[in-house]
Amino acid sequence: MEKLRRIIEWTKLKIRIESNENDIVYFKEREIWWASLGSNIGFEQDGKNAKFERPVLILRKFGPEVFWGVPMSSKKKEGRFYYVVNYDDFDYSILLSQLRLISSKRLVRKLRYLPEDEFEETKKRIKDLL
């Protein structure tokens, strides 16, 4: 029942996000943003809290409205599907297998840039998965 309640709440927020046509979000590759990813299905990464947010690394920008993004987790995960980066003495896992096309309408606020060397390593690891 809790999952159903979250899906309903996410649907309400998604309608507000989709109908908002005023905000233009300026973003670049290598940036990490909080993004409203929603309440998803199966093993897809859900967002957290009221805005269903999760940090997302912008991997490739395809224009002002869409990009390839890779969700991140505050839980340290190991294995070939994860890449751990450190920020302010805290480990984050980049969830390489969760690469997806994301609308810039989902972007909430910018956190920081990923250092160039870690960004290049992330791209290399994703290519290795393909």
Image (cartoon, grey):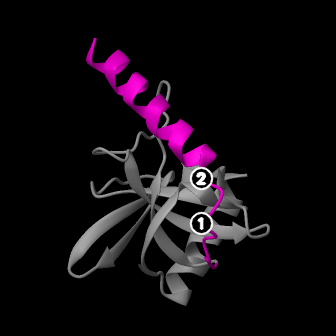
Residue denoted by label 1: 23
Tell me which residue sits at (50%, 25%) in the image.
Answer: 41
Does the rendering let one see residue 120?
yes
Tell me which residue sits at (55%, 88%) in the image.
Answer: 116
Q: Amino acid at mark 1?
A: Asp
Q: Residues within 10 Å of mark 1 (few under 14, many from 20)?
A: few
56 displayed left or right of 23: left
Does the rendering let one see residue 95?
no
Residue denoted by label 2: 20
Q: Amino acid at mark 2?
A: Asn
Q: Is residue 25 magenta?
A: yes
62 displayed left or right of 46: right
Expressed as whole percent of the image width and height from the top left, the position of residue 62 reads 79, 67
| Magenta part of the chain | 1-28
Q: Are marks 2 and 1 in contact (CB under 8 Å)?
A: yes
Q: Main secondary structure of the magenta part?
A: helix
Q: Nearer the viewer, residue 14 or 92?
A: 14
Residue 69 sits in quarter: bottom right
Q: Which mark is residue 76?
A: none
Q: Secondary structure at mark 1?
A: loop
Tell me which residue sits at (63%, 61%) in the image.
Answer: 104
Q: Is residue 77 above or below residue 28?
A: above
Q: Secondary structure at mark 2?
A: loop
Q: Is residue 45 above or below residue 92?
A: above
Q: Nearer the viewer, residue 76 or 19?
A: 19
Extreme front residue here?
22
Expressed as whole percent of the image width and height from the top left, the position of residue 51 reads 36, 47
Label 2 to label 1, Cα distance in Å? 7 Å
Expressed as whole percent of the image width and height from the top left, the position of residue 52 reads 38, 44
